[in-house]
Amino acid sequence: MNNFIRGLWNQHPIFRQLLGMCPTLAVTTTAVNGLAMGGAVIFVLFFSTCVVSIIKSLIPAQVRIAVYTVIIATFVTIVDYFFKAYHPDISAALGPYLPLIIVNCIILGRCEAFASKNTVRASVTDALGMGVGFTWGLFVLSGIREFLGQGTLLNRQVLPAGFPVLGVMVSAAGAFLALGFLVALMNRIEQWKT
Amino acid sequence: MNDTLKITGTLTVTCLLCAFLLAYVAGIAKPKIAAHQTRERRAAIQTLIPNAETIRPYPQRENLFRIYDASDTLLGYAFLAEGQGYAGTIRLVGALDADLSRLRGIKVIESVETPGLGSKITEEDFRGQFENLKVRPKIGLTKGETSKDTQVQAISGATISSKAVVSILNEKISLIKAVIESNRNH
Amino acid sequence: MENLILIFISAILLNNIVLSYFLGICPFLGVSGKLESALGMGMAVTFVMTLATSISWLIYHEILLRFQIEFLQYVVFILVIASLVQIVEMFIRKFSPPLYQSLGIYLPLITSNCAILGIVLFMVAKHYRFHEAVTYGFSGGLGFFLVLLIMAGIREELAYADVPQVFRGAPLTLITAGLLALIFMGFQGLLGT
């Protein structure tokens, strides 16, 4: 159980470890994109850590990173084909950021730091925790950007029409600013707790 | 020696297994992806030629199609073209009359031009200029008022994006003319 | 030629890979603290990026597309990049020890730098021809280099500023990057007319 909880707050991949920054910033223009990215990451994280912890004793230490990377790339390709075949609009919105999950440090990080040393069950719980943590991070960030930038949430109009929106929040600059303030906020919350 | 063998072996086996798995997944997904693309292309062509019924690929040419109506008369040709714009690749669908003298219209399907300037290539004001535009000898671009029926007006502040669209079209149309005319003569 | 100049300027100023495509953020947050290390990292990335786009272009078009096995592209690209980094590292160590001294420690970091895989994927998505792809890789690298240098310069100064505790480190870097991205949006008007 601890393995699961850890990724949700104390070792939150985005706010505490600052991992997987490119997708975090790039695809969080709308909440739907954020959720789709989160789902893709959970899938890849789950299966890669699962496979890695099963075959960990078979892999020579010198090539373990190469083997992990190939395994991760394989699962990413599968997700990519899934979106292309069943949700082409989401696939178009995520674009090359979906295949970029391959170099998302969270996944290789969990394979190397956790799955290669622990049982399948522990690894999978850990992966789910990290994945869910990553997803809620994406959801919060993308929700804020969509709300402030377009006045909508999950594609539904929330602010009254004609209400001034901050177009910059949807742009690249808005991504950096929003994440900067969010990380600062998380630091503040941590301070209060102690 | 034994180590080298083990390392090479592990890598080869991993790569082979992954390749087989992916080949299997790709085999399932590819027909579905192709179907999506056909559907999208059809929708785009029908916005340009509303009475288009049958769309047949031109023999031995990718991205060129013959368009027929319900009674199977040739309405014209549709094409996919792309080129470098100001900020990235511009991809568009266009349709030509059966005698290749006029454009039926264009539709930009992918572009990352500057929001508010170059992005206007997707808007009606610019796009509309290509409806029934004469393309012989070639499409021209002007910054002022149009003086010929082959001319379109550039978007102010985004000449490079406008010029890109026109030159993508000119290049593609002259290529299509060459292909279709050489086939007619044979 | 006009095409290549457009790609060059676009990749450095208009669509900078760090500030508008968010590629290579991890080294950007990690390495940009000191000017000297930013220089080394920037050079290493530009070099590997140019090589990676050229080789991946050749493999993608001459092998993967030709034999219709493009479903292997992601696996192949990441392996190309990883082996490229290894080869470059061995090569530099053997033939130019001084260069190895300055670049060496940054090379292993590059494999996990998403900017390299990113630029290769964007190159494929943009359907570039060979010379365009190489130009794109090179200018993408320069764009990364430029932003890394600017950022390192700013952070060296910021180190002496009195910043509220909660903003120290990553939050401040992110916000600075946001302001930089806003400034770079000004380049959108460049060449506009």
Image: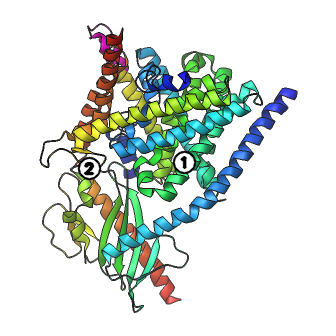
Is the residue C126 above or below the residue C168 in the image? below
Q: Chain of mark 2?
A: A
For disc 1, the marked residue is A79
Residue B74 location (% of width, % of height)? 40, 88
Residue at image location 51% in from the left, 36% down from the top: C116
Q: Which residues are magenta?
A: C152-166
Amino acid on which disc 2 is placed: Arg
Q: CA distance from mark 1 to mark 2?
A: 27 Å
Does the magenta portion include A166?
Answer: no
Whether residue A65 appears in this view of the structure is: yes
Residue C138 location (% of width, % of height)? 47, 38
SS at badge 1: helix
| Occupied quadrant, residue C186 | top left
Amino acid on which disc 1 is placed: Val
Q: Chain of mark 1?
A: A
Residue at image location 40% in from the left, 34% down from the top: A136
The label number, if any, that marks residue B158 in the structure image: none
For disc 2, the marked residue is A156
Prevailing secondary structure of the magenta residues? helix
Which scheme is used to colour this image of the protein?
A: rainbow
